[in-house]
Image (tube, rainbow, N blue to C red):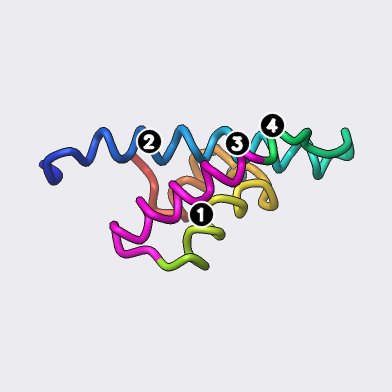
Amino acid sequence: MGAVGLDGTKELISGHLGILRDYAKKVLVGQGTLDMGEEAEKERRIQELFTVASSLGLTMKETVVLLYKPLFIKPACECSTCRFRRGSWS
Ligand SMILES: [Zn+2]
């Protein structure tokens, strides 16, 4: 199916996305700020995420949307009607 190495890339990206979203939630939920170690880790992961994403043809803006959009949208309804409307019926 996909290109060679794509699985590894997807895992790398989803690892970064998960941790970066956790950091964002921590700040957004008002639990305070990231400490210096977390801030440095966040920067490192964002840089690597941008690098990998751009190699896949994503712009920086698209990457930011990919990263943070799920934090601002309600979870999709999983009833059969909504799934059918979304076209994600499977
Ligand atoms: Zn529904």
Secondary structure of the residue carrying tag 3 is helix
Q: What type is the residue that disc 2 sits on?
A: Leu
Label 3 close to label 2 by CB (< 8 Å): no
Range shown magenta: 40-58
* Percent coordinates x, y for residue 88 in the rendering: 39, 47
In the picture, the quarter occupied by the N terminus is top left
* Disc number for residue 66: 1
Viewed as shown, does residue 18 lie left or right of 86?
Answer: right
Give the distance between the C-alpha atoms of the residues marked 3 and 4, in whole angstroms. 6 Å
Label 4 close to label 2 by CB (< 8 Å): no
Label 2 close to label 1 by CB (< 8 Å): no
Viewed as shown, does residue 71 lie left or right of 62?
Answer: right
Give the distance between the C-alpha atoms of the residues marked 2 and 1, in whole angstroms. 14 Å
* Percent coordinates x, y for residue 12 in the rendering: 37, 35
* Disc number for residue 10: none
Q: Quadrant of residue 59?
A: bottom left
Give the distance between the C-alpha atoms of the residues marked 4 and 2, in whole angstroms. 20 Å
In the picture, the quarter occupied by the C terminus is top left
**Of label 1 and label 4, which has the lower sequence position?**
4
Give the distance between the C-alpha atoms of the residues marked 1 and 3, in whole angstroms. 19 Å
Density class for disc 1 (Cα within 10 Å; few <14, some 14-19, many ≥20) is: few
Q: What type is the residue that disc 4 sits on?
A: Gly
Q: Quadrant of residue 69?
A: bottom right
Q: What residue is pinned by disc 2?
A: 12
**Of label 1 and label 3, which has the lower sequence position?**
3
Q: What residue is pinned by disc 3?
A: 41
Q: What residue is pinned by disc 4?
A: 37
